[in-house]
């Protein structure tokens, strides 16, 4: 069973894969729906979003398969990512020298047909593929091939969106920690109404108001005529 060729930028590809923090994560509806749609459009019983690591392929989403991962040496997708701009179609794996003795072909699940489109990220790195599987020989018509390309781009979009949301949440947590720990009073208020929206603990200590009391005030209320803040009296 010939091994899949390694691309020249394999080390960088693996770093990019790990940077997305997708491996071994819980199922997510957006990805599950895309594999189900791929299987339905192409009329096959199984489909996966497969991420190819150094020594395994792990399924971020799957339909029609029990396994959650396989060794990379058994992976059809490891071959697909070597040609990132093309769809790889195997009409009958038993007749293809690359796969005829693959355990996934000769034993369960008994793959016969495979088609996969690489998940090519904006960086140019391929994380894996969106693939469909059948247990009997077949092919895809041009419309189904185009649909698989479109759905692969949708998977890439979901991965990028997931990463952006994760980074935003991380930034928000970091900001909140800095906001809470800052020794200088910080008061956030509406620029039009001057209503106070948020304060940090240093503001509560410095002005002598509780958090709940602050939210009933406006910025104008924090400017006593004598220029002293309440907490300094």
Image (cartoon, rainbow, N blue to C red):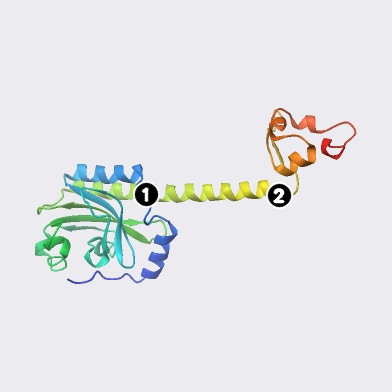
Mark 2 closeness class: few <14, some 14–19, many ≥20 residues within 10 Å: some
Q: Which mark is residue 136?
A: none
Per the rendering, the mark at residue 26 is: 1
Q: Do the residues under discs 2 and 1 have CB atoms within 8 angstroms? A: no
Looking at the image, which is closer to me, 125 or 177?
A: 177
Instruction: Name the spot of residue 10 as percent of width and height, x first.
Output: 36, 69
User: Residue 12, percent across and down?
Assistant: 41, 67
**In the rendered view of the protein, which quadrant contains the N terminus?**
bottom left
Q: SS of the residue at dot 2? A: loop
Relative to 67, is 3 above or below?
below
46 vs 6: above or below: above
Query: Which quadrant would residue 222 be assigned to in this image?
Result: top right
Residue at the location (39% across, 50% down)?
159
Q: Residue at x 34, y 49 (%)?
A: 155
Say which element carries label 1.
loop
Residue 166 horizontal/vertical position (percent): 48, 49
Horizontal side of 39 relative to 222 (left or right) equals left
> Circle 2 sits on which residue?
182
In three-dimensional space, the C-alpha distance between marks 2 and 1, rounded to whole angstroms, equals 35 Å
Which tag, 2 or 1, sits closer to the chain's start? 1
Q: Residue at x 20, y 42 (%)?
A: 40
Image location of residue 19, percent across then percent down: 44, 60
């Amino acid at each position: 069973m010939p091994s899949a060729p390694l691309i020249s930028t394999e080390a960088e590809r693996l770093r990019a894969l790990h940077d997305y923090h997708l491996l071994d994560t819980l199922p997510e509806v957006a990805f599950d729906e895309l594999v189900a749609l791929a299987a339905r459009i192409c009329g096959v019983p199984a489909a996966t979003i497969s991420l190819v690591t150094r020594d395994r392929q792990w399924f971020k989403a799957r339909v029609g398969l029990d396994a959650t991962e396989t060794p990379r040496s058994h992976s059809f997708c490891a071959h697909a990512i070597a040609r990132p701009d093309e769809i790889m179609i195997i009409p009958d794996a038993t007749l293809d020298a690359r796969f005829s003795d693959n355990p996934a072909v000769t034993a369960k699940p008994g793959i016969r047909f495979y088609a996969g489109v690489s998940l090519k990220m904006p960086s140019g790195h391929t994380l894996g593929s969106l693939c469909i599987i059948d247990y009997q020989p077949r092919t895809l018509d041009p419309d189904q091939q185009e649909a698989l390309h479109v759905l692969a781009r949708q998977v890439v979009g979901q991965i990028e969106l997931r990463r952006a949301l994760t980074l935003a949440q991380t930034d928000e947590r970091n900001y909140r920690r800095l906001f809470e720990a800052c020794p200088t009073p910080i008061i956030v208020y509406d620029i039009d109404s001057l209503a106070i929206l948020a304060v940090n603990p240093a503001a509560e200590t410095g002005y002598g108001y509780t958090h709940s009391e602050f939210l009933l005030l406006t910025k104008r209320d924090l400017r006593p005529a004598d220029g002293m803040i309440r907490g300094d009296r």
